[in-house]
Structure formats: structure tokens, C-alpha cells
Amino acid sequence: MTKRRMFLRMITASLLRRRSRMLIALLSIGIGATILAGLVTIYVDVPRQMGAQFRSYGANMLILPEDGETLTRGKLTESLASIPEEELVGAAPYRYVRLDMTTRQQSFTSAATDFGEITKTSPYFSVEGAYPSQTRQVLVGKEIAETIGVKIGSTMELTYQPTARASNMTPEESRVPGATLSGSAEGFGGGIVYVTAKLDENAAIASVTVDASTQTPEYGGRIPEDEAFMNQFAGKTLPLTLGDGMDALTGATVTSAAVLEALNSATEVTAALTPKTLNFTVTGILTTGGEEEGYVFMSLEDMENMTGEDRLDVAELSVSANVEKLEGYAEKIAAENPGVRARMVKRVARSEASVLEKLTALVFLVTLVVLLLTMICVSTTMMAVVSERRREIGLRKALGASDGSIRAEFLGEALFLGLLGGIMGAILGFVFAQVVSVNVFGSSITFQPLLLPAAILVSMAIAATSCLMPIKRAVAIDPALVLKGE
Amino acid sequence: MSLLELKNVSKIYGELKALDNVSLHVDQGEWVAIMGPSGSGKSTMMNIIGCMDKPSQGEVLLDGVDISKESSRHLTDIRRDKIGLVFQQFHMVNYLTAVENVMVSQYYHSMPDEEEALEALGRVGLRERARHLPSQLSGGEQQRVCVARALINHPELILADEPTGNLDEANENIVLDLFAQLHREGTTLIVVTHDPEVADAAQRTIVLEHGRVAREVINENFGK
């Protein structure tokens, strides 16, 4: 028999035949290794886990039109091509329009969006009932629902009243047959005079209304009631000049001039856009705790139907990437898509990064503490083992064991324990990490093949380091003293 | 030829002189008993001869080498190579079997050899019990394993400290017979005891009192 085989035989006999003692040492190493392996697995997986988690706190990037430009659905799709598909969690387009509910004499901000994307970018939206699944359905914010008393299944009649200028046409371009023009000009004392004019089939003036409520009541303020003045317009074509077929109202020359100026600068408001009313069914009530509770959500299709425009105000993106990457994507989107700009929602992206950093640091710290505790635990156990085996050590020395042999034997036992503990730790640690991951992060993790050798090496190193003090003590044992004792 | 020689050896612990100017010599192949009441310096002498302690003064020559000045590391080597120890409490490694306990001694000395270890157990009549753990052996059996372990490396000197102190008469006789056998084979034996019967088995008895050699008795009846 070689010395090595005898060495192994002694070590295994010590571990196997002194089971209860060694089981404690093995447990302390094994549990330590388990927690360490688990924490390391989580540590490695935290950025991925948390990245996915953070995506549930809302969008971290916005795509907006440049000033004076329009963001269409097509442009948005093109812009999204700059972000890798696997990192794009969701992209919710939004168009905000003021709609009236004439039956209640109320008006609300209506947000048109893609409900499929909303569930991805804003998973925290809490919907009682269901998201609209087809057109002519709306999701109503809780605040609105409470104000006007709608319930799931209620019908809402919503009207789009085009008030803003529909186009950027010049006054001349606006003077088309059948057009309605509106304009304003500064009158007497700085007050604004508003006018609207309807044109007939020949683009001549059919009728004019004037709002001169800002003018002096007994002078310019009389214009809307003054039939002689008001009747001058019918059949005339714009532009108009005072004196050239048009007379000013006596005592209100400035206001009269303002009315003409307003008409001359008037542009078309609603050439083809008469108010449009649609009926919607409420499918759900939305609770978010935020301003969304004051909105009525509908599909982009319905909104386009009502406004006649393919136009988005903003798109909220949820991208699973760090701050640096997000900045890169934003630049790329702006560079490759003229008229479009993208920016990171700094608050979200930065807090994500800082929380991630803190969490990683925390796991690291806990790992360190567990490492230390494990070492103390193993060291204490081995210390107890040494005192328990004082006689045996003394005997071995009396039989001629050198200090080196004593060291080798204890170290051998420790490394053997480390090996077993490491295997145990790698397997149980993975289970531990899996349980934590599933319960805390709600997603499973994949087994890192490197974990097994790493756990074994680390726990062997821990076991060996923890044994340094106990071994020192073992070596110091005086055989003569020990062997004399009863 | 002298195997062991103590020249004016003293061991002083503070005020106490455990050994006080002791001189002694033991020839190769001799069987010597050391007797004396408790506190007479037996254990101290045993530790010094067994290379587990060093004298405060004097010289100890073992096989011509002065061990009183050696480093403890060297003493371990000398002990391993030249001395077989037998203790009163028959110390064994409790998780190793009888034969493994014998092999531990081989392991530290040179090469473990199971066959040889089994043979040694056979000499002490325990070949059948070779695979038993110490807890499964009686006191007498354990002490016989210790004798087998002491002789396995063919030491020049077997140093036994009260080897029969914890044994009944039957086992005491077995152990003494083993010693007699070893003596016939030329092994030098030094047996510390306070049992006169055990001392009577030796060729010569040295009586210690207060750390000094009080007297020496030659056993006239030796070998009869």
C-alpha cells in the first residue's frame, strides 16, 4: 500500500466513522457554499432579472416629432427599427385629443393608443373589466368614470370638434368655395376682434359673424348688431378695403378696420371637418394613481376616423437596456429618421441604473458576510474537532508524525469536506437561487455550468483557510502532556 | 554495548527538581524496569528517553547520539526511527481498525504494509480481530494492538509506561510474555511500572526516589 492510499484511507475513515462530528462540519461548509452559490447565481443574474423587472415601471424612452413636423405611425415603425428587437419590450404610440361628450356638456382628453403595446410599456395599469379589443370601445380613467358615472358596458357619445386650424394654408389658399374662414385682428384699445365668414359656391362671402365684445360697447361694440354694416359683406370677395365698396361704422373706424383686417387674414378652419360624433362602449375602468385616470383611451383607428389624421404626439418605449445603450439608440433614431427625435426618460433610466447598482452592491455585501460567517463557522467546528482529537494528535506525534504530516492530514480532511460541501452547495445553491428568483423576481434562471467547479473550488478554499488556526493549534499539541492525561 | 546513557541528567521545573543529577546506562538488548512512587520522576525520565522532552542539564546518549540538544523536529525523527512506545491508556486512533492503527505507525515510519501489520497482530494473537475498531476490543486486546504497533517498525528500544496498569492478570501475563519474546529477539526494553511483579520480569530494576536513583536491583531469578 502506498503512503497516499493510507493517507486517503485515514482521511475517509475519519470522515465516515466519525459521522456526527463531520456532518456538522460538512453542514456548515455545505450551507455556506449553498448560500454563496445561490447569491453568486443571483448576483450574476440580477442585472438581467432586474432589467426585466424595471421594464414594468414604465417607459424609459420617448419618440417625439421635431417642432413643426408630424409623427405618423409609419415613421414610428421606421424609427423602431433602430432598436434590437429582443431589447424592445414595447412601444406605445399616443395621440392626445380633446373630445366632447355633448350629452353631459363635458370634455375630456382622449388618448388614442395601441392597447397591445400599453400592456407591455405600462404593465402597472390596473384595469377593471378589460382593455378594448376592437374599435368603438374605450377604456375610461377612474376619475372620469366617477365624475360622469359611466360603468363597464355603458355607451359614451364622443364628439370631435375641430377648433384648431386644420392646415397651414395661407388666407389666399383658404378662400375656396364653401369654406369657413376664421380670423382675428387687434381693434380699438388693443382688444381682439374675432370674425368668421362662410363662402358660397363662388367663393364669395355668404355670411359673416363678428365677435366685438372687447370693443367699446357704444361704438365698436355695436358692430355685430348694426345691420347696415353687417349687410355690406354679402356677395363680396376677399380681400376687402375700407372705402372700396366698404364703409366704416360711424364712430368706430378702428373696429371697422379691424373687422376687415381679420377677414382678410382669415384662414380655413373646417373645410371638410365638420364635428364628428361616434358612439363607444366602455369595456374597462383604468386605475393608475396618475393623470391617466383623467383620460379616455381609444384605439388609434377610431381616433383617425374622428380626426381624419394619421398623427401621433408621442410614443412611449420600454427598452431593456442600460443608460449608455439607451443614449445610443436615441441618437441613432434621431440621425436616421428626419423629423423625429428620441430621448431617454432620464428619471427612469437613471434610477434603474442606481437601484441596480445598489442591489448588486447589496448582494455582494451579503455574499461577503456569508463568506465570513461560513469561515467562522467552519473554523469553530474544526477547532472543536481539534480539541476533541487532542489525544489522537498527540498519539500520532508520539508515533513519529511530523508537523507537516499533521498539517497534511487536517488539511486533507478539510479539502475533502470542502469538496463534498462544494458539490452540495452548487446543487442546493442553484435550487436556492431558483426559489428566490421565482418568488422574488418571478422568473426562472438557467444553471451556470461553471457554478459547480467554482463552488467546489471556493468551498475548498474556505475550508482550507478556516482550518489554518485549528491546524496551528493541532501542531502545537505536546504529545507528552496529552498522553499522560487520564 | 550501551544503547542508552544518561549522564548527570536534571530536569528542573522552577523550584522542583523532577530529575536530580541522574546517571544511568542501558545496554543493547537489556530489559530494564524503572520503579518508584508517584512524583519520583518516572514520567519525566520516560519523556526524556522517549524524545518527548529535553533535560535541563546533562546529556542523554541514545545509540551514540546526544538527544538532549536536538531540535524537537529531530527528536520526532529519532523517536520514529528508534523507539516503540506503549502507554498505560493504550492510546489508539478510535476511528481506525486494529490493523489500521498498526499501519499508522508504519505510515509515519516508512511504508504502510497491511500484510506485515496483520502478521504483527498475529504475533500478539489478534489476527482475527484485525478489522475491529478499538471500541469493539477489550482493554487487554487494545494493549496488545499497541504492543504490535510498537514493534512493527523493529525499534531498537521499546519504551513502555505502565503497560499493565489497566489490565487484569491474564492480560498482564500475555503482555509480559510478549515482552519476554521481544527481549529474546534482542529488543531493548525499558518498562516503567509500579507493579513489583512487572518489575520482577525484567533483568534489572532501577528505583527512583525524589528524582534520584535510590538503588538498582539485579533480578537473580531472571529467565528462570
Image: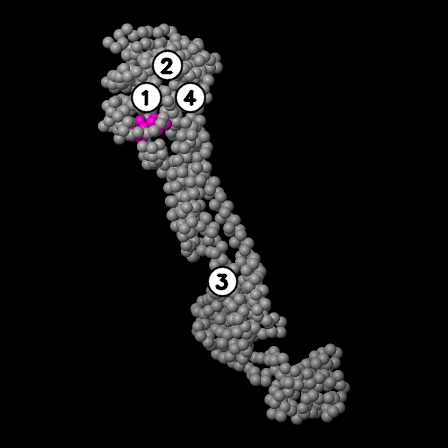
How far across and how far down the image is residue A121, in percent? 50, 65
Identify the subunit bearing mark 4.
B
- Circles 4 and 1: CB atoms closer than 8 Å: no
Compare residues B209 and A150 and report the one nearer the observer: B209
Return the disc, 1 or 2, that comes first in the chain's sequence: 2
Q: Which residue is mark 2?
A: B3
Q: Is residue B166 above or below residue A134?
A: above
Q: Which residue is mark 1?
A: B154
Compare residues A273 and A433 and report the one nearer the observer: A433
Which circle, 1 or 3, is nearer the viewer? 1
Compare residues A261 and A144 and report the one nearer the observer: A261
Q: Quadrant of residue B185?
A: top left
Q: Quadrant of residue A353?
A: bottom right
State the mark number for residue B40: none
Q: Which residue is mark 4?
A: B75
- Circles 2 and 4: CB atoms closer than 8 Å: no
* Mark 2 and mark 3: Cα distance apart in space: 87 Å
B84 left or right of B174 in image? right
Dot 4 amino acid type = Leu
* Mark 2 and mark 4: Cα distance apart in space: 16 Å
Q: Which span is picked out in magenta?
A: B96-108
- Circles 3 and 4: CB atoms closer than 8 Å: no
Within-10-Å neighbours for mark 4: few <14, some 14–19, many 20+:
many
